Image (cartoon, rainbow, N blue to C red):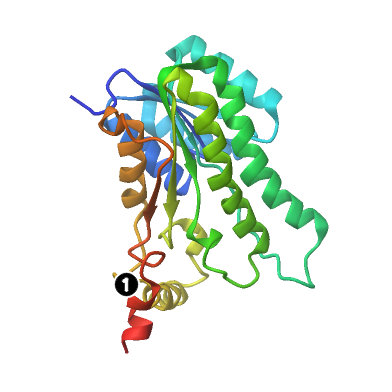
């Protein structure tokens, strides 16, 4: 038996990166999965690859009407939601003194407003005892230069999660946050394998475990929070970053 047998999950941004890896893991554990994204071509590819256990809809988390439409169709097919993984997000450089208003605003709109309205749109379809997982980031606290909007957006996720815990606990709905560190996903790939390897090597030196994470390692943390194994875990942040957040001075760059 799978850990998610009979459960129905919504994963935003489920057509690439960590979201896609999590979609595949959830299906392997017995879930039916509804994925949303903005790229119709990749949504079609995922739906074709994964078959009848997945429904793919082009929908923008910042457009409640499109999310409502997707969810009403999905629930008509699969039934009510047991799991919501608000994973969709973007990261854009926003250096002080050189950032356009629209770029800064878009990061907050997708990462913060989009996450809130994902949960709000899903709310009418959530079963009692459902699990909501939000996506944070170690960028919220590491002070990386040029990432003010992204850092602010992920700090906001942590604050928002606490409020959602208060509002949803009466229904037995759990709200937790997964906080990834540097993870090997397509957004890290450079123009050549050599450049990608160089970037990964430099990142590894800032991580106590001396490597970047794999998407499967993030997905396994999401699976734990989605499953009944975490039935008394509420309002938690699970950081999956090889120790970079908890013990930064343990990284190889400081060990010599």
For disc 1, the neighbor class at 10 Å (few under 14, some 14 to 19, many from 20) is many
Whether 232 is drawn above or below 193: the answer is: above
What's the residue at 47%, 76% (across, down)?
Answer: 195
Q: Point out residue 28 in the picture as x, y percentages from the top left corner.
A: 27, 32
Whether 237 is drawn above or below 187: the answer is: above
Residue under numbered circle 1: 208
Q: Point out residue 181 in the picture as x, y percentages from the top left corner.
A: 43, 60
Q: How many marks?
A: 1
What's the residue at 74%, 56% (across, down)?
Answer: 104
The answer, for residue 59, to whether it is visible in the render is: no
Looking at the image, the residue that sits furthest to the top is: 76
Q: Is disc 1 placed on a helix, strand or loop?
A: loop
Between 52 and 4, the one lying in front of the other is 4
Indicate the quadrant containing the N terminus: top left, top right, bottom left or bottom right: top left
What's the residue at 33%, 44% (across, down)?
Answer: 221
The answer, for residue 241, to whether it is visible in the render is: yes
Looking at the image, the residue that sits furthest to the right is: 101
Residue 53, image quadrant:
top left
Indicate the quadrant containing the C terminus: top left, top right, bottom left or bottom right: bottom left
Q: Point out residue 47 in the picture as x, y percentages from the top left corner.
A: 45, 30
Whether 94 is drawn above or below 28: the answer is: below
Q: Point out residue 246 in the picture as x, y percentages from the top left corner.
A: 37, 65
Residue 118, image quadrant:
top right
Residue 127, image quadrant:
top left
What's the residue at 52%, 15% (across, down)?
Answer: 125
Looking at the image, the residue that sits furthest to the bottom is: 256
Would residue 169 be found to the left or right of residue 231 on screen?
Answer: right
């Amino acid at each position: 038996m799978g850990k998610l047998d009979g459960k129905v999950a919504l994963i935003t941004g489920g057509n690439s990166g960590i979201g896609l890896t999590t979609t595949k893991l959830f299906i392997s554990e017995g879930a039916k999965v509804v994925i949303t994204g903005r790229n119709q071509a990749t949504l079609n590819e995922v739906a074709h690859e994964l078959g009848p256990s997945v429904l793919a809809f082009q929908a923008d988390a910042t457009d409640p009407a499109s999310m409502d439409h997707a969810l009403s169709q999905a629930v008509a097919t699969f039934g009510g939601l047991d799991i919501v993984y608000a994973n969709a997000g973007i990261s854009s450089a926003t250096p002080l003194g050189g950032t356009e208003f629209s770029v800064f605003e878009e990061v907050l709109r997708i990462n913060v407003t989009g996450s809130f309205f994902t949960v709000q749109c899903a709310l009418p379809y959530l079963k009692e005892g459902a699990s909501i997982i939000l996506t944070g980031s170690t960028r919220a606290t590491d002070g990386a230069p040029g990432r003010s909007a992204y850092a602010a957006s992920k700090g906001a996720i942590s604050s928002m999660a606490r409020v959602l815990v208060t509002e949803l606990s009466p229904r037995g709905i759990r709200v937790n946050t997964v906080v990834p560190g540097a993870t090997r996903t397509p957004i890290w790939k450079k123009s050549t394998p050599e450049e990608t390897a160089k970037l990964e090597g430099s990142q590894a030196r800032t991580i106590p475990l001396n490597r970047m994470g794999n998407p499967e390692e993030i997905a396994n943390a999401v699976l734990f929070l989605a499953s009944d194994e975490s039935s008394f875990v509420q309002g938690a942040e699970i950081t999956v970053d090889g120790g970079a957040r908890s013990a930064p001075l343990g990284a190889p760059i400081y060990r010599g």
